[in-house]
Amino acid sequence: MLIRKPDAIQSSEITPERVWRARRDLILGAGVAAAGLGLPGWAGRAWAANAPVGEPAVLPGQASPLSVMDKQTSLSDITSYNNYYEFGLDKSDPAAHAGKLQTRPWTVSVEGEVGKPRTFDIEELLKLAPMEERVYRLRCVEGWSMVIPWVGYSLSALLKQVEPTANAKYVEFVTVVQRDNMPGVRAGVLDWPYVEGLRIDEAMHPLAMLVFGLYGKVLPNQNGAPLRLAVPWKYGFKSAKSLVKIRLVEKQPVSSWIKAAPQEYGFYANVNPAVPHPRWSQASERRIGEDGLFSPKRKTLPFNGYADQVAALYQGMDLKANY
Ligand SMILES: Nc1nc2c(c(=O)[nH]1)N[C@H]1C(S)=C(S)[C@@H](COP(=O)(O)O)O[C@H]1N2
Ligand SMILES: [Mo]
């Protein structure tokens, strides 16, 4: 049996925790966190887990050629190590608290620079296009990654329904706020609702996915039920959860992360090992589930390994300036 000596712990194990703590401290306000004062009660583990138990409904998808062949992250890791700040700052908070999220009734309004603005009921969206299973990499800006078999279809299928006008240069995504059900919303944390955005050609790219399920079942609440984005060549924060509004707009949207820390989080947020975050490197990553004592970190790939499909979207752009 291996005896784990403190000096044997590799930096690859230490870094992710340090990094997400740094992001958490940013959110809480460095002074507050450092002094250990005024931490909201939910930041600890005081609350009992209240996620409902019971089998989620099946949601099969046709296997997609857009899938990667990497070993898939386990369902338990995918559903217990999450970022969903509306439910708290700890990785375990979404699984503990997202049981309260009300996912029915649910509508998504698609509006703005479109010929046919429309509000879609979730039941309509589930039938709008054939469900596909696509195994995508997800690379969080904090330096960890997963491989997730999503179920859904290309976002373009929805956008085409509303007929974007020539003025639709960008797409803004607005996610749900249920104050009574979301301890992170009550505590402040970010400027709610959580808002993200894509350029229209990014949003129309076949890889940009509207997700309704994972591992052949409907999405667990902590992963963004009843529908979320998956934009696999960008850092995970672009993949907004629990969407309620999609606005086609002329001007570049201001995301919640840009509002919180513009020098740290850019609009494009393409995975780029050559552009470090101001407070940590992005050159490598820890694949969740592979984090054994001696497992090396993986090299992060440009565009998270999707360069062949998406690099052309950024031809002629300075990706250091447009981080
Ligand atoms: N509404 C909302 N969407 C969100 C977030 C969030 O806090 N709120 N976190 C983002 C971040 S930082 C990441 S890494 C991914 C995590 O998705 P997962 O928990 O399903 O792995 O969700 C993204 N979408
Ligand atoms: Mo993230």
Image (tube, helix red, strand yellow):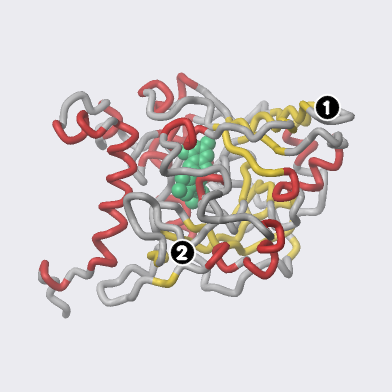
Judging by the rendered image, the residue that carries numbered circle 1 is 117
Q: Position of residue 284 (x, y in %)?
A: 40, 67
Q: Measuring 38% from the left and 65% from the top, which residue is drawn there?
A: 286
In this rendering, position of residue 213 left or right of residue 48 = right
Compared across the picture, whether 208 is left or right of 179 comes to: right
Q: Nearer the viewer, residue 145 or 305?
A: 305
Q: Determine if the C-beta at disc 1 is less than 8 A from ligand 1.
A: no
User: Please, is residue 162 above or below residue 81 in the view?
Assistant: above
Residue 175 place in picture, x, y as percent: 58, 31
Q: Which residue is mark 2?
A: 273
Q: Is mark 2 within 8 Å of ligand 2?
A: no
- In the rendered view, would you say 278 is above or below 243? below
Q: Label 1 crowding class (10 Å Cα cut-off): few <14, some 14-19, many 20+?
A: some
| Residue 222 seen from this side | no
On the question of residue 216 being in view, the answer is: yes
Q: Secondary structure at mark 2?
A: loop
Rendering quarter of residue 69: bottom right
Q: Quick one: label 2 or label 1, which is nearer the N terminus?
A: 1
111 to 25, vertically: above or below = above
Q: Is residue 122 left or right of residue 85?
A: right
| Mark 2 → mark 1, Cα distance in angstroms | 39 Å
Q: Amino acid at mark 1?
A: Pro
Along the line of sight, the residue nearer the viewer: 30 or 14: 30
Nearer the camera: disc 2 or disc 1: 2
Q: Position of residue 83 (x, y in %)?
A: 43, 44
Q: Residue at x 85, y 36 (%)?
A: 166
Residue furthest to the bottom: 1
Could you classify mark 2 by the number of other residues whose Cα lies within 10 Å: few (under 14), some (14-19), or many (20 or more)? some
Based on the displayed image, in which of its 4 quarters is residue 136 positioned? bottom right
The residue sitting at 32% across, 50% down in the picture is 279
Q: Tell me what residue is drawn at x 69 percent, y 51 percent.
A: 209
Q: For numbered disc 1, what is the local secondary structure?
A: loop
